Image (cartoon, helix red, strand yellow):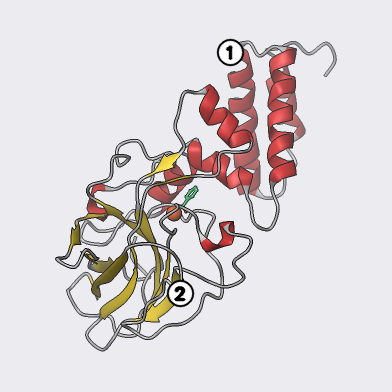
Amino acid sequence: MRNLNHETITDAVLARHADTADPRFKQIMGSLIRHLHDFAREVHLTEDEWARGIDFLTRCGHITDDRRQEFILLSDVLGLSMLTVAMNNDKPAQCTESTVFGPFHVDGAPHYDLGADISNGAHGIPCLVRGTVRAADGQPIAGASMDVWQSDEDGLYDVQHPEIGHAQARGILHTDEEGRYYFHSILAVPYAIPHDGPVGDLLAASGRHPWRPAHLHFMIEAPGYQTLITHVFRSDDRYLDSDAVFGVRQSLIADWKQQPDGTYLVEYDFVLNPADRT
Ligand code: BEZ
Ligand code: FE
């Protein structure tokens, strides 16, 4: 345990974890330590670079509060969030795919009747959203809860407008007896993820843009089915192939059709996976 060098220190640290009681925690910590040490050796991390890394994480901590989660944003832009979603949401092919949750969901959104306008004053071009929620065998799922949220035409969610004291462009609806849903909202537009903090600096230093393709968020829950957290994307969006958080799935892209009166219509049918199947 004395005179450890840059090679032998890894085994020494791992040995110090030999008495970890929880086997899963032991596995995770062991792998993390091995990969972290290998990473430092591979790039030959300098002391100055180590300090800059610590400073970056410190800045992430300082900017994080109840309304802003810079660590999740970091995980998102590094593809870790989507990797975790993809690994844990393997489903039969006919089921709707999952994607990232994102930081802008709010618990306790207002409840609306089918057909309501959930924009609630948010600015944007009116858009009708409709479709069905079904099981893989085609059976409609009645009474499924749909929590929907989206940004306004400026690409901002209501929670990013400190002056708005109420929910806009978000709400909870329930499917009818035939599994149908329909509501009015506003046209989704591409928007930049928060990039005025350390994660924005990281993107800039990497020559990356902060944009996400236009999308609507859905969280759909029904007894006996796995909760589905997903988006519906616009097929005409220029950022579909360069989403800042890697959340796009081909199966989640829909045509948003402009109507003769200038408003939009998007139709999307969701298929839920039974709770006991992977
Ligand atoms: C979102 O779609 O709301 C989102 C997801 C990841 C990072 C930032 C925003
Ligand atoms: Fe979003």
Q: Can you identify the residue that label 2 sits on? A: 120
How far separated are the C-alphas under marks 1 and 2?
A: 51 Å
Observer-nearest of 255 and 252: 255
Quadrant of image for the C terminus? bottom left
Which residue is farthest bottom? 177
Q: Is mark 1 within 8 Å of ligand 1?
A: no
In which quadrant of the rendered view does residue 28 lie?
top right
Residue at point 75%, 21% (across, down): 51
Q: Amino acid at mark 1?
A: Val
The local secondary structure at tag 2 comes to loop
Q: Residue at x 58, y 35 (%)?
A: 199
- Give the residue type at disc 2: Asn
Helix, strand or loop under label 1: helix
Residue 117 placement (x, y as % from top left): 37, 77
Q: Quadrant of the N terminus?
A: top right
Q: How many marks?
A: 2
Residue 173 image position (x, y, % from top left): 39, 80
Does 130 sit above or below residue 142? above
Tag in front: 1 or 2: 2
Name the quadrant containing residue 143: bottom left
Q: Viewer-proximal residue, 108 or 118? A: 118
Q: In front: 186, or 57?
A: 186
In this rendering, does residue 272 appear at all? no
Residue ID for mark 1: 43
